[in-house]
Image (cartoon, helix red, strand yellow):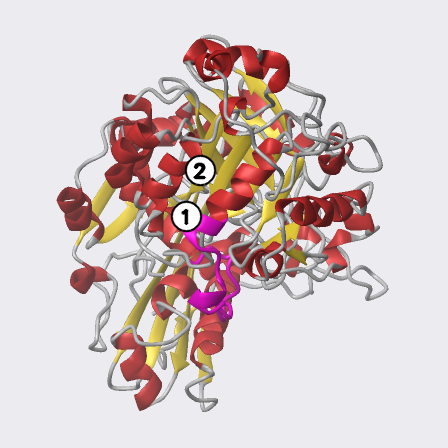
Amino acid sequence: AAAGWGRRGGSALLRGAVGAAPGRSCSSGAPVRAPSAAAQELQSSGGRRFLLEHAAPFSAFLTDSFGRQHNYLRISLTEKCNLRCQYCMPEEGVQLTPKSELLTAQEIISLARLFVKEGVDKIRLTGGEPLIRPDVVDIVGQLYKIEGLKTIAVTTNGINLARLLPRLKEAGLNAINISLDTLVPAKFEFIVRRKGFHKVMEGIHKATELGYRPVKVNCVVMRGFNEDELLGFVDFTKDLPLDVRFIEYMPFDGNKWNFKKMVSYKEMLDTIKQRWPELEKLPCEASSTAKSYKVPHFQGQISFITSMSEHFCGSCNRLRITADGNLKVCLFGNSEVSLRDHLRSGASEEELVQIIGAAVGRKKKQHAGMFNISQMKNRPMILIGGFPVSKVYSHVTFFFPPEPALMSFPLCQDALQNPPNSKQWGHTFSHRLTLRASLPKQMGKALMKNKCLEASPVGQVSVDCQSKETSPGSEFSTRDSGSSAKVPRASDNLTHTDEEGRATMVDVGGKPDSRRRAVAGAVVRVGEKAFGMVRQNQVKKGDVLAVAQIAGIQGAKLTSQLIPLCHNIPLNHVEVSLSLDEARYAVVIRSSCQTWGRTGVEMEALTAASLAALTVYDMCKAVTHDIVIEEVKLLSKTGGQRGDFSRV
C-alpha cells in the first residue's frame, strides 16, 4: 500500500503510479483510483509519519540548475500593513493591487497543495502584515489539512498577535517570527511611524505563554537608528525562550538604502563579545540563513542574518509567492511569473508544475545574478514579504555612555517581562518620555536605579504655544537674544590652522579632563499656516517636533563626521527640546550636550540645534518655502581652560 501512494498519503497518487514521470506529480486530469483499505489506514498519524519518512525523491521541478532543492515556500497574504517601517515601506507609500487581482484563499490553498506535492514541507505566511487579513485563521486551518506539510509559520509585526494567537495555534500554526527593531518605545514609533510598542511586547509574551519554542524576534539593524541596542536585545534572551535575529539592512525600492547604514554581522558580533566573551556558537542546518549563538545559562539565543556581508545563496531553499500571485525565485530579483493568471485561465496542475519548474530552473547562482545588489530594481520590501515590519513624543532625553556598552537594558526589564495592559501604556505614553541608557558607573547608579520611564505632561514642557523663557537656573535659561554676551578672554590666534595657514586638528592630548557642557539654540520661522499644522500635528510627513528632536540628538552624536576638524567626543548626555512661539509663528529649539573630557561640546550642541532646525524646514517645505532659520547660536558653555561663557 505504501508503494502505491505518494508524498501526500491518501490524498494523491504516488508520482509515476499512473504514468507520470518519476519526480513529477500527476496533472489534475489524471485518473485517480479509490484508496484501498490499507491506504486509508495510512491516513492515520502513524501512516502519515511513515509516508514522511519514506517519501519519493525530491521533485526535479523544485531543484534548480545548481542542485538547490526548494522545500520552503513563503506566501504573502496581503500587501497592506498597519505600520510604515522606514526600511520596508517607502515614505510616499505603495500602489496597492486591486483586491480582485489578489489571490483568494482558495487559490492560496490550491497553490500550496501543489507545491507540497512537489516537496515543499514548510510554508511561511507573510505580507504586508498577514494578520490583518480577515480570513488568516481559516487559511492556517486549511493549510494544516495538507498532509506532508510539516511547518506552518507566520512572520508578523506583532500588533494583532496577542489577540489572534490562541485561535491561530488551535488552527495549526506552529512557528512565529515577530518584528521588533527597538526596545525603546519612542524610537519604535519613529522607526515604524505608528504607535504599538506595547502590543508587540504583549504578542511576544503571549507566544511564550502558549508554548512556542523559540519565539523568533527579527531585528533589522541600522546604523544611526538602533545599533546601540544590540546588548539590550541579547539581554532580552536571558529569561525568555527567544531567538533574537539581527538582520543586516538590505536594499529595496523606496527604503533609501546606502552602505553606511548597514552594520555587518562581524561588527555586531564583536560588540556583543565585548560584553559576553563566553558567547557560544551553535550548530545549524545546511540550508539555514542564520548564524546562531548563545550566552551560557540564557534561556534564549541570538542569530545573525548575513544577507549582505556573507550571503547564503549557495544553500537557498526558498521560493516566494506575492500577494498578487507572482512567483519570485529570489528575494533580490525582479523576475516574476504570474501563477495567478495561469491558475485563472484554467491551466492544469501539470502545466502549472511545468511553469514553476521553468522559473526555478532560471534561478541565478546568487542575488539574482547581480554584482551590486544595492543598484537593483525590485519591489519595495512591503510587497515582497521579505521581512515584516509616527508619532514620537515631543521631548525625549537620551544619555550616552563614553564606553561601547551602549544600552542598559535592565532599566526596562520590568516592562518587558510584565508588560502593562493597553490602558496603562496609553496613559504612560501620552506624557513626555525621558529615556535613560547606561551612564558611567560613577554618575549613573543613583540616577537610574529602578527607573525605566519618567513622565511629565507634554503641555508643561515640550509644546508651549506661547513665547516664554525657561526658568532661571534651567540648563536652557537665557535672556532675550538681543542682550549682550559675557565672553571670556579669547585667543589672539586661530587654533585650527598651522603656521602656514593650513587646516589642522588641535592636539588636546595635554589638556586635563574636566566636565564640559554647552547649550545652543535656533529659531525656525515657518509662517502662520505651517505653524498651525505643526501645532495640530497635521503635517503629512509626521510629527515635526518629534522627528526634528530625534534628528538633533542624532546630529550631536555625528558631529565629528560632519565637521572635519572636530574631535570624536563620547557624550554623556544629549537633550533637545522644541517649543512653539505663537507670536513669531516659530519653532524654538534648545539643545544641551555634556561630556567629561579634554575638549568642549559647543559644536555638538550647535550641530544638534542646526540639524533639528533643518529637519523642521524639510518637513514643512511642502506647505511653504517662506521659512527662515535664524538665531543659531551658542547660549552657554562651562568647563575648559578659557572659562565659562554665557549670554546675559
Which one is nearer the viewer's eye here, 179 or 78?
78
- The residue wearing badge 2 is 154
Density class for disc 1 (Cα within 10 Å; few <14, some 14-19, many ≥20) is: many
Residue 488 lies, in percent from the top left, at 48, 62
Are the residues tagged 2 and 1 within 8 Å (C-beta)?
yes
Q: Is residue 240 visible?
A: yes
Q: Which mark is residue 112?
A: none
Tell me where residue 25 sits by quadrant. top right
Q: Is residue 426 left or right of residue 339?
A: left
* SS class, disc 2: strand
Residue 628 lies, in percent from the top left, at 45, 85
- Closer to the N terminus: mark 2 or mark 1? 1
Q: Residue at x 64, y 41 (%)?
A: 27
Q: Main secondary structure of the magenta part?
A: loop
Q: Residue at x 57, y 26 (%)?
A: 303
**Range drawn in magenta:** 84-107
**Residue 409 versus residue 256 in the image, above or below:** above
Which one is nearer the viewer's eye here, 78 or 237?
78
Tell me where residue 503 sits by quadrant. bottom right
- The residue wearing badge 1 is 130
Q: Residue at x 29, y 70 (%)?
A: 579
Q: Is residue 108 left or right of residue 166?
A: right
11 falls in the magenta region: no
